[in-house]
Image (cartoon, helix red, strand yellow):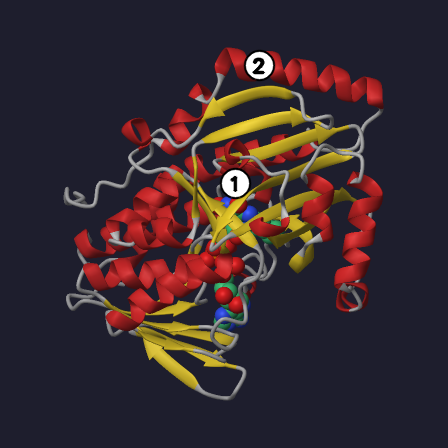
Amino acid sequence: MTSNHPPHVLIIGGGIGGLSLALFLHKAGIGSTVYEAYPPREAAGGGLNIAPNGMNVLAALGLAQDIISRGAVTMQHCFRDEHGKVLASIPYGNITKYGQPGVSMSRADLHEVLAQAAKVAGISIQYNKRLTGIDQHPTGVNACFEDGSSDSGDILIGADGIRSRTRSIILPDGPQPAFVNVVGVGGFAKISDLPEITSRELRSLNFTFGAKGFFGYCAAGNEYAMWWSNLYATEPMSEQALRQLSLDSIKAEMLAIYKDFHAPIATLIEHTERPIKQNISDIQSLPTWHKNRVLLIGDAAHAVSPNSGQGASMALEDSMYLAKLLRDGNGDYEQVFTQFEQDRKPRVEKIVAEGRRRGAGKQAVSPFQAKVRNFMMSIFLRLFGIKGQDWVYQYRVDWETRQRA
Ligand SMILES: Cc1cc2nc3c(=O)[nH]c(=O)nc-3n(C[C@H](O)[C@H](O)[C@H](O)COP(=O)(O)OP(=O)(O)OC[C@H]3O[C@@H](n4cnc5c(N)ncnc54)[C@H](O)[C@@H]3O)c2cc1C
């Protein structure tokens, strides 16, 4: 499976991984087309924090300043108990050490920055193109879409998220996404509606741990704050129940749990706009990420729990590293895909495991257990701070040095 001309790459999924891959391929002189199932701006809800390692990837695309101007820089992680007592406060946005700060923003804004950059670069993004089938042959690959159309290229990259159709085609008997007993809830509120929020809170990622559960919040850019929380459930919510949700029902449910947590939590919930509620799943280690001319990246290959705060950054790192390998490879795609998986898997799987561990610490517990957990957490965080996370945030893809085969 060797070719001596630059490949044309079919990218399935116009999310964080797919769009950033198209941009890095463009930088490497490799052409691609992105196929996204939804119309523009429809797929992206909620907010997210891009960690310094992800921001370094965006900086390599020249997009860091745009992201910072639309989002909110977070300088520290602040852990509190439900009464507002600070358990630990540790620096996060250490630019000298990590190169870039962490930035929180709406997912829609991040997509818009990436899509706009792709447009400027002349990259074709085809919306309303839902992949249904893949046909591989000795000289190329065809992608078939729900609307009856098809397209062909040299290789196909599945960046189509946790419910990846690409994955189910190349690994029909592989692991399926599994519900992790968490329903994620979140939303945005105007900062002007939150008189109690402090400037310290607006510069921090705030994590509050109480007996009844966990509540996180931070500034999100554009004069908004965002919040998120985990609800534990034995069964995932049905499609019908998710469709029937209303802003009022989400607010009422969250206030019933968190109304006695410290300010500004109740006010944040009361002023929520654009709420989001979804079943959270992850996926066990896949036996392989590739088959012949097809490779999976981002959540399609390794869905990281939101508790890690690293899913977007992993998709960004994947994109940059894959584009570099394709640029420097000798046209043997299978060799490139094998090397990609071999080099990326240990790091992402360590982060997946860390995300699961963090999720377990956020469950509702008895008041006594909450006190013990919070005491242990404050000791641990004060002793080790963020040093334990250096391996996550300091990671860099060296774009300039050419990769030896
Ligand atoms: C509630 C929640 C909070 C999170 N918070 C954070 C956070 O704070 N920080 C962080 O780093 N990560 C966070 N994550 C994880 C992060 O969102 C993902 O890891 C990241 O979006 C993965 O990027 P991706 O490009 O692989 O997939 P996605 O962003 O899911 O993009 C996949 C794209 O493929 C498209 N698609 C799907 N199927 C098809 C098809 N058949 N044909 C064509 N297109 C298709 C989708 O519409 C979508 O646009 C969070 C996740 C959740 C659920």
Residue 374 image offset from top left, x and y in percent:
69, 19
Above or below: residue 321 compared with residue 75:
below
Given residues 272 and 173, the one toward you in this image is: 272
Q: Residue at x 76, y 17 (%)?
A: 371
The answer to whether the residue bearing label 1 lies less than 8 angstroms from the nearest atom of ligand 1 is yes
Residue 353 image offset from top left, x and y in percent:
56, 34
Q: Which mark is residue 41?
A: none
Q: Residue at x 23, y 64 (%)?
A: 26
Above or below: residue 23 compared with residue 396:
below
Mark 2, residue position: 380
Q: Residue furthest bottom?
A: 148
User: Which mark is first along the chain, 1 or 2?
Assistant: 1
Given residues 286 and 92, the one toward you in this image is: 92
Regarding residue 204, the answer to whether it shows in the image is: yes
What amino acid type should be assigned to the residue bearing mark 1?
Gly
Mark 1, residue position: 309
Q: Which SS class for mark 1?
A: loop
Q: Quadrant of the N terminus?
A: bottom left
